[in-house]
Image (cartoon, grey):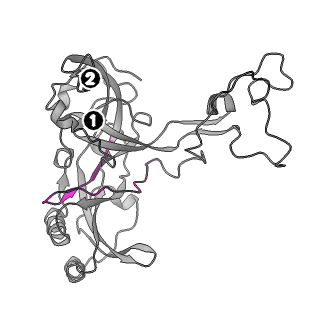
Amino acid sequence: MGRRKQNAPRHGSLAYLPRGRAERFEGRIRFWPEISSASPKLLGFSGYKVGMSNSYVTGDRRGSPTFGQEVNESVTLIETPPMVFCGIRAYSNVASGRQALTEVWNKDQPKGLDKLFSKPKYLNIEASMKKMEENLDKTVELRAILSTQPYLSSTYRKKPELFEVKLGGGTVKDQFSYLVGELGKEIRVSDVFRESQLIDIIGITKGKGIQGPVKRMGVKKLPHKSRKTVRGVGTLGAWTPHFVMYTVPRAGQMGFHQRTEINKQILKINKDAEALAPTGGFTKYGIVKTDYIVLKGSIPGPAKRLVKLRYSSRPPSVNIEAVAGTQQVEVQASTKR
């Protein structure tokens, strides 16, 4: 501990190492939860972060003095334009894990998808569908290939994002029948989630470039008469081992990391974008044009960044939906940055 007269916890969590830059602007969903449902359901969706505001909601924390009363909460708004079913992908088990078995693409693809990849000139949908149906006994997982429509929002993007969403509930045959009926159609966020539900948010945090150990890891500044440096650690380690250990706080990349926020409660799902009408629009975003959801609390990333929504991977033991019920949420006009 150097010159300290007392013990102190280490600075900077080691749970997020290595703190490198994310590969893309949108996060990867590496885990899908299992749900118990008789009918098939999509387990994920996506949207664009609008910003933060505040609203009056009913307190749902049991044991709190404000339980059942109207409280002011910080909320985050996410614009969720409808997504398009582009294709179906089937997975089978192999020795090394899951492997794509076959896939089916819709003939009419959404606008701007050719900016991502070149479309095949000839698509034999009937043959691909027949092959997938014949291999249902080998299929262990079905996923829907969804495409975003950013041009419907205020992000002013032209290139859509494409990713897979797992189906949960029902049997494989039920899921296949559901996907065949929905192929090529639009899906809204209200078809996937409901109000008062707890969901996970996967996104990329704000990038802050290269920062020193004081800002990056939270270490204390040394006294002003320190030798060589003040905004650094007092020692890089002992003589043995003869190298700087990875646990020592050092300068490096800060921000633009993938993070997952679990159990964020949906306070409101609305299609009436005119209900959100701050003067001049939201800061750094603009006017909300399509569907949107209101989440309690904050989420990672700046405005206009794509975030992915997923069914809760670790739901709490207490049924918060039954406690909260349908809440009346009124978003204030004053927004936060």
* Left or right of 210, for residue 325: left
Question: Where is residue 188 drawn, in percent x and y?
Answer: 19, 47
* Left or right of 18, for residue 236: right
Determine the image quadrant of residue 68.
Answer: top left
For the record, the magenta segment spans 25-47
| Residue picked out by circle 2 | 63
Residue shown at 32%/40% (left/top)? 263
Tell which tag, 1 or 2, sits nearer the viewer: 2
Question: Where is residue 37 drawn, in percent x and y?
Answer: 16, 57
Say if residue 289 shows up in the picture: no
**Secondary structure state at the residue bearing disc 1:** strand
| Residue picked out by circle 1 | 265
Q: Amino acid at mark 1?
A: Gln
What whole-number distance in Å separates the C-alpha atoms at marks 1 and 2? 19 Å
Check residue 257 for magenta coloring: no
* Left or right of 236, for residue 273: left
Q: Callout 1 environment at 10 Å: few (<14), some (14 to 19), or many (20+)? A: many
